[in-house]
Image (tube, rainbow, N blue to C red):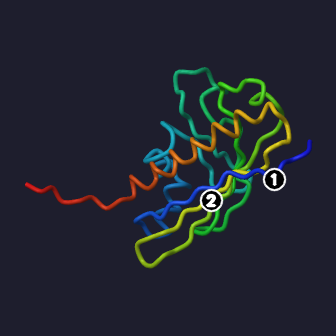
Amino acid sequence: MELSTREIRTTRIIGEPPHRAWARWTTHEGLTSFFGRDNAVDLELGGRFEIYFLLDNPPGLRGSEGCKVLSFLPERMLSFSWNAPPAFKEVREADYKTWVVVLFTPLGADRTDVSLSHVGWPKDVRWDPVYEYFQEAWEEVLSGLEACSMPERPSGD
């Protein structure tokens, strides 16, 4: 399979130190705070990185089942395989997954630059709608991360 040079890239500066941003991406509790409705994550090489969005669907069609941790540097980098949503049946059933790399760069004591790149896109028109879908989806995911990491403001009463 020939791969394209296409890349989805998005970045957010969040109001948390790197160790907390890291925990949001690598723990069950952290992920449920901004990404999906449930998950199964085993932070080890080849460990599960499954995020579930559609809990009423049958197993195998709930989210990123079968995706794995590819590599990590604690509090600095996480990479994992990623599949197409169930709506893209033909691509989802293909024996191929793209991959995602998340970088965590400290910006002082209480801020972190979180940069996500989604790469490994095949040169195949069947993947074009999936690429377009994730251009928006990753923006939403990182916006959710940014929102949940904002410090709470005192009420003005």
Quadrant including the N terminus? top right
Residue 77 vs 109, above or below: the answer is above
User: Real-space Cα distance between discs 1 and 2?
Assistant: 18 Å
Report the disc number at residue 5: 1
Q: Residue furthest right?
A: 1
How crowded is the residue under tag 2: few (<14 C-alpha within 10 Å), some, or many (20+)?
many
Q: From the viewer's perspective, tell me whether residue 94 is left or right of residue 88.
A: right
Q: From the viewer's perspective, tell me whether residue 18 is left or right of residue 147.
A: right
The x, y position of residue 9, in whole percent, is 64, 55
Quadrant including the C terminus? bottom left
> Which amino acid, mark 2?
Val
Q: From the viewer's perspective, tell me whether residue 140 is left or right of residue 90.
A: left
Between 35 and 125, the one lying in front of the other is: 125
> Which amino acid, mark 1?
Thr
Instruction: Please tell me whether mark 2 sits on a helix, a strand or a loop.
Output: strand
Residue 45 vs 137, above or below: the answer is below
Write down the quadrant of residue 96 in the picture. top right
User: Which residue sits at x=52%, y=21%?
Assistant: 56
How crowded is the residue under tag 1: few (<14 C-alpha within 10 Å), some, or many (20+)?
few
